[in-house]
Amino acid sequence: MTTFKKIANRVSTTIKAGSSINNTDDPVIFNVTDASKLPAVSFYFTVEKLTDNSVYEIMLATDVTGDQITATREQDGTTKQTFSAGDLVQIRVISAHINDITTAIGALESSISNWDSAYSHSQLTSGNPHNVSAADVGLSNAVLASAVIDDNVLVRGDGGARGVQGSGITIDDSNNVSGITEMSSQSLKINSFKKNAVGWKSIAANTTTNIATLTMTSGSNTDLMVKIIISGGENQEERGSICQVASFSGRSTLTPSQISTTTTLWSQISSSVPTITFTPSDNGVVTISITNPNATYALSWAFDIEILSNENCNITLL
């Protein structure tokens, strides 16, 4: 940022009695009659002989202490002169002030021009303005495909050297996916489909309790994973956790044969392993229940029901 010399209006004083300026000292130190209107340093000022206005010198004040001025001489093309007490000391607008301003404006205009040029260059969306080759960016072995791939089609390798082909799977401009013939939801969890509900039940000894229902809102396949963490019984001796996955399909007239289940026992401290049951109805509703096989102790069950692949199935805790 440019630092301009200070300036003030209507500053006019004289060299103080007993003080003078010779034509050799540089910097020069002298006193003025009234320093009250002088601005903060640094500032240009003009010294002029009272009896001959053709004799003058422009100086640069670098320090003002009381009425004493320390100045650098021969500013703005002037030369050293001799001055006596009573000669004029004034602040005037001189060419150096204007030159400082025009220089700063010129530098600003140049900076703006450079920025504008750089910005315009950054907006180029075609061509190769820097003549960059594939080898310059490490792509000397790149193969340019001459074939045109249909709009919105995902690409895949064709088994050849750096070859690609259309996959048949498309994602339209609204992000709708089509062309997938089969997908395993056991291995792929799609967050936009994910629904889950958590709850807690205390189940009496040797008793079966319903914990939730699943309601199918349209015909489709659904994978359901239920994780149950168990604690309870005397001295908490009946503890463990299981994970069971059930797959079922259809909107109505579901039968037990349409439900396939897989149970993974994560941990078991005793022989009392709980049973998870999925009971379908003919209206597209599946009831989930837990059986406590322990003949002596009531057990507390925390469960997390999670739908992995169907957004058209709702969970209701009982």
Image (tube, grey):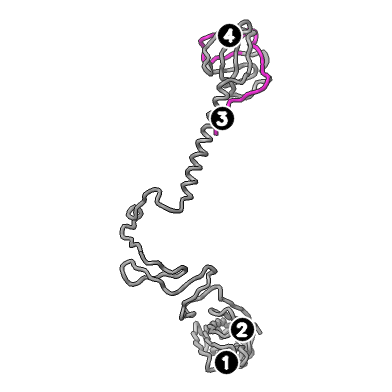
Q: Earlier in the sequence, mark 2 or mark 1?
A: 2
Task: Inspect this view and state whether residue 295 appears.
Answer: yes
* Magenta region, residue range: 1-30
Distance (Cα) linking label 2 and label 1:
14 Å
Q: Amino acid at mark 2?
A: Thr
Distance (Cα) linking label 3 and label 4:
31 Å
The mark closer to the camera, 2 or 1, is: 2
Q: Is residue 19 above or below residue 224?
A: above
Main SS type for the magenta part?
Answer: loop
Q: Amino acid at mark 4?
A: Ser
Relative image position of residue 312 (x, y in whole percent): 59, 80
Relative image position of residue 279 (x, y in whole percent): 59, 91
Q: Is residue 52 above or below residue 279?
A: above
The residue sitting at 68% across, 19% down in the picture is: 10
Left/right placement of residue 247 relative to residue 140 reads: right
Residue at the spot of label 4? 54
Q: Which mark is residue 3?
A: 3
Relative image position of residue 247 (x, y in whole percent): 52, 86
In reply to whether residue 263 is colored magenta, the answer given is no
Task: Inspect this view and state whether residue 240 appears.
Answer: no
The mark closer to the camera, 2 or 3, is: 2
Q: Which mark is residue 15?
A: none
> What is the count of numbered marks?
4
Secondary element at image label 4: strand
In reply to whether residue 9 is colored magenta, the answer given is yes
Q: Nearer the viewer, residue 31 or 77?
A: 77
Q: Which mark is residue 254?
A: 1
Distance (Cα) linking label 2 and label 3:
75 Å
Q: Earlier in the sequence, mark 2 or mark 4?
A: 4
